[in-house]
Amino acid sequence: MHVTQSFSHLFLLFFLSVSVSHGQPPASLHEPWNELLHKYVGASGQVNYRGIMNDRSRFDAYLKLLSAHAPAATWSESEKLAYWINAYNAFTVKTILDHYPVKSILDIDGGKVWNTMFISIGGKMYSLDQIEQDIIRKQFNEPRIHFALNCASASCPKMLNEAYTAEKLNAQLTQAAKGFINDPSRNKISATSIQISKIFEWYQGDFTKKGTLIDFLNQYSIVKISAQAPIKYLEYDWSLNE
């Protein structure tokens, strides 16, 4: 790493430490992740893992920032949720990088990678599953997160090529929902029948708290779906999203 890069990382760590110590929202926390996503994630959501590996020092510096700056009680709900979405996605990328080259995330840890306790945040250890199930799903009651969390697989929602931020969170989640639901490679929707991602089967309860599954889909679908349309769930492609 160049000296200038090292100084920049140290300055950012110092700035964020001062900011958090005063209970201020860490406005620059996710900027390194934002820069990496802009550079290494394409418009189609494909991730250039090899490129991130070659930029590993900058990526690891961001993970250290996440580990050192857990959400505080003074943060807004949007700041907390943006943090946890970014953390989930970044540590998923770390999982792939640590085992690269790999054909599928299911090839890691015997397919139980989501239960592996490898994420250090605020002095506590977490698994990906704990972040998703115990924090994001349980605390925020936001079904659109299922289109923001990326599991490094072809059938997963696309990795957004920018970091989630509190200021843009609602618009970003809506963009992710519309993008996923109307993507013909992930869902096949017509007015009279739908073939949709297994995400809607696995987490159906999250999508049906205020109506039927079709009611939820119709909030974001370009095509208006009949309430009587039969539903079929598509096979999930776990091949790596690169």
Image (cartoon, rainbow, N blue to C red):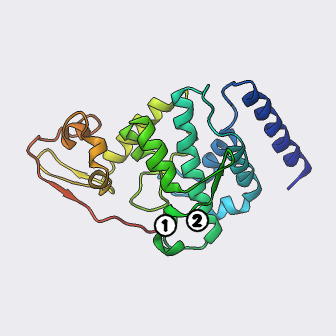
- Compared across the picture, whether 86 is left or right of 21 comes to left
Q: Which of 140 and 160 is in front in this view?
A: 140
Q: Is disc 1 surrounded by few (<14), some (14 to 19) or many (20+) residues within 10 Å?
A: many
Q: What residue type is labelled 2?
A: Ile
- Compared across the picture, whether 132 is left or right of 50 comes to left
- Visible in this render: residue 108? no
Name the residue at 33% across, 57% down: 185
| Residue 157 locus on image (x, y percent) | 42, 51
Q: Is disc 2 surrounded by few (<14), some (14 to 19) or many (20+) residues within 10 Å?
A: many
- Visible in this render: residue 6? yes
* Kind of element beneath mark 1: loop
Name the disc covering residue 111, or none: none
Q: Quadrant of residue 186 in the image?
A: bottom left
Answer above or below: position of 72 versus 163.
above
Name the disc covering residue 240, or none: 1
Name the residue at 11% across, 47% down: 229
Find the distance from the CA under tag 2 to the CA under tag 1.
Answer: 9 Å
Earlier residue among tags 2 and 1: 2
Name the residue at 45% across, 62% down: 153
Answer above or below: position of 146 versus 142.
below
Q: Which residue lies furthest to the right in this view?
A: 3
Question: Would you name the residue on which mark 2 appears?
Answer: 96
Q: Which amino acid does label 1 sit on?
A: Leu
| Residue 207 locus on image (x, y percent) | 28, 42
| Residue 83 locus on image (x, y percent) | 58, 39
Answer above or below: position of 162 versus 28.
below
